[in-house]
Image: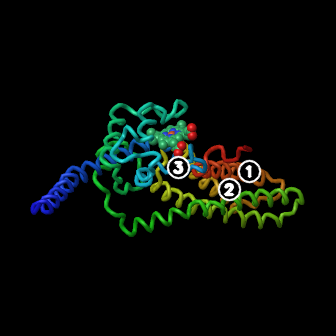
Amino acid sequence: MKFFLPLSVFLLVLTGYVRAADDPAEGIKTATRVHEIFEAKCLDCHGPELPRPKGKFGYVLDLKRVAENPEYIEKGHPEKSELFKMVFNDEMPGEDANVPPLTKDEKDVVKRWIELGAPEAPQIAGDSSGASANKSVEAKPQMPVWKKALRWIGRMHPVSTHFPVALMFVAVFAEGIAWWTRRDSWLQTVRFLVILAALGAISAAALGWINAYFASYTGQLAPILKWHRWLGTGTAVWSIVCAGLVVINECREGSTERQRFRGALLLGAALVGISGFLGSALIYGLDHYAWN
Ligand code: HEC
């Protein structure tokens, strides 16, 4: 009886020690791999950017939150965890997914992760280009302040794009009035609008490059980002061409220069519209103008 208390304390400490001993390193490694697997195979339908994630489950990369949801995970018991069962039986990612089911190896990783008590993954910084394992295995250090500031500046990209979009469209409108009224004075307005649009487009494109550097779009979204990036950059360049045409030439109504400029402006407005659409598709999905 005398030994009971110290003994039980000893046992408690021992079990705690043993658990701690096999947990952290393996836990972090496994969680990091699970994060990578989910990023590659689940993000298309359960990503945080989606307006309507499938099954109302839009946080697949937030491993902590996933682990805390008893409907998905029963810590320590993969065979009782709904998420593992779905993945194991190839129900997730489903047949209609763009990605193949998990390999046996990947299933084992998910299983092991739940056996270990579904630990959290270390903070994984923006880039996801490397599906390669060892790249993100070591925990990433905190982002330096300048980088954080840069990331914050990049977040101004979506709001900044409203300027070139609206200004180009209004420039087309003003150019339409110029054509209709045949008044040369409207050229001043068009000039003003196109120059501002070009400045806005250059800023928006620069911010876009910064924003994309910190973003991670995988699956279906990766090619959209590529198109958006290059069309957007092209649009900025084209808007400079438009500004050049309208500034350098006298552009009297009816002249060839004016017609050339008019064509360039229409093309620029179309480009800015398409780039904008692709940009919003990154956030809301390609079908965000669907009626239903
Ligand atoms: C092609 C799209 C798609 C992919 C990829 C996908 N899922 Fe799903 N997922 C769905 C759909 C659709 C549902 C809703 C099914 C239902 O409610 O019947 C769902 C539901 C779920 C649910 C249940 C949500 C709930 O609360 O009902 C879990 C858990 C889940 N998925 C996990 C995953 C995991 C883990 C992956 C990656 C290994 C994955 N899914 C990949 C489409 C997908």
| 128 displayed left or right of 208 | left
Residue with the most extreme left position: 2
Dot 1 falls on a residue whose secondary structure is helix
User: What is the distance, in whole Å, between disc 2 and disc 3 at their CAs?
Assistant: 42 Å
Question: Badge 1: how crowded within 10 Å, few (<14), some, or many (20+)?
Answer: some
Question: Badge 2: how crowded within 10 Å, few (<14), some, or many (20+)?
Answer: many
Residue with the most extreme right position: 181
Labels 2 and 3: the sequence-earlier one: 3
Q: Residue, x 53% and y 62% (percent of image)? A: 155
Residue 87 visible in the picture: yes
Which circle, 2 or 3, is nearer the viewer?
3
Labels 2 and 1: the sequence-earlier one: 2
The amino acid pointed to by label 3 is Gly
Q: Position of residue 75 (x, y in %)?
A: 36, 48
Residue 219 visible in the picture: no
Label 3 sits on residue = 58
The amino acid pointed to by label 2 is Cys
User: What is the distance, in whole Å, between disc 2 and disc 1 at their CAs?
Assistant: 10 Å
Label 1 sits on residue = 266
Q: Position of residue 276 (x, y in %)?
A: 64, 52
- Name the quadrant of the N terminus: bottom left
The relative height of residue 121 versus residue 96 in the rendered view (above or below) is: below
| 169 displayed left or right of 109 | right
Q: Position of residue 206 (x, y in %)?
A: 53, 60
Labels 3 and 1: the sequence-earlier one: 3
Label 2 sits on residue = 242
Dot 2 falls on a residue whose secondary structure is helix
